[in-house]
Amino acid sequence: MSTTTTDDSTDLDADDAPIEVVRELEPELTRLADTDLPIAPHAQNALDRLEEAEADA
């Protein structure tokens, strides 16, 4: 019998995306954040992170 394990430490959540990626995807994230799709809150979180990063820069 073999078992399979997964290493969750390499899994990235949408909220963990590097800020450079968020910046590149800003138009798409803005459109997604304005929808009723389940991903909308994650898109808004990413946009909020981008706004914070730009304010800190």
Image (spheres, rainbow, N blue to C red):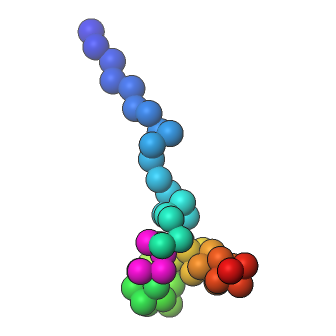
> Magenta part of the protein: which range?
21-25
- Taking the view exactly as shown, the residue that stands out farthest to the front is 57
| Horizontal side, residue 31 vs residue 56: left or right | left
- The part of the image, by quadrant, that contains residue 16 is bottom right
- Point out residue 42 in the picture as x, y percentages from the top left corner: 53, 71
Q: Is residue 23 magenta?
A: yes
Instruction: Please name whichever residue, 5 or 9, is drawn nearer the observer in this view of the structure.
Output: 9
- How would you classify the magenta stretch by its main secondary structure? helix
- Point out residue 4 in the picture as x, y percentages from the top left corner: 33, 24
- Taking the view exactly as shown, the residue that stands out farthest to the left is 1
| Residue 44 seen | no
* Residue shown at the point (39%, 26%) measured from the top left: 5
| Horizontal side, residue 14 vs residue 4: left or right | right
- Point out residue 25 in the picture as x, y percentages from the top left corner: 41, 80
Q: Quadrant of the N terminus?
A: top left
- Taking the view exactly as shown, the residue that stands out farthest to the top is 1
- The part of the image, by quadrant, that contains residue 10 is top left
Classify 53 as above or below 11.
below
- Point out residue 32 in the picture as x, y percentages from the top left corner: 44, 84
Q: Quadrant of the C terminus?
A: bottom right
* Residue shown at the point (53%, 71%) measured from the top left: 19
| Residue 43 seen | yes
| Horizontal side, residue 37 vs residue 53: left or right | left
Instruction: Please name whichever residue, 34 or 16, is drawn nearer the observer in this view of the structure.
Output: 16
Instruction: Please name whichever residue, 22 or 33, is drawn nearer the observer in this view of the structure.
Output: 22
* Residue shown at the point (55%, 64%) measured from the top left: 15
- The image shows a total of numbered marks equal to 0
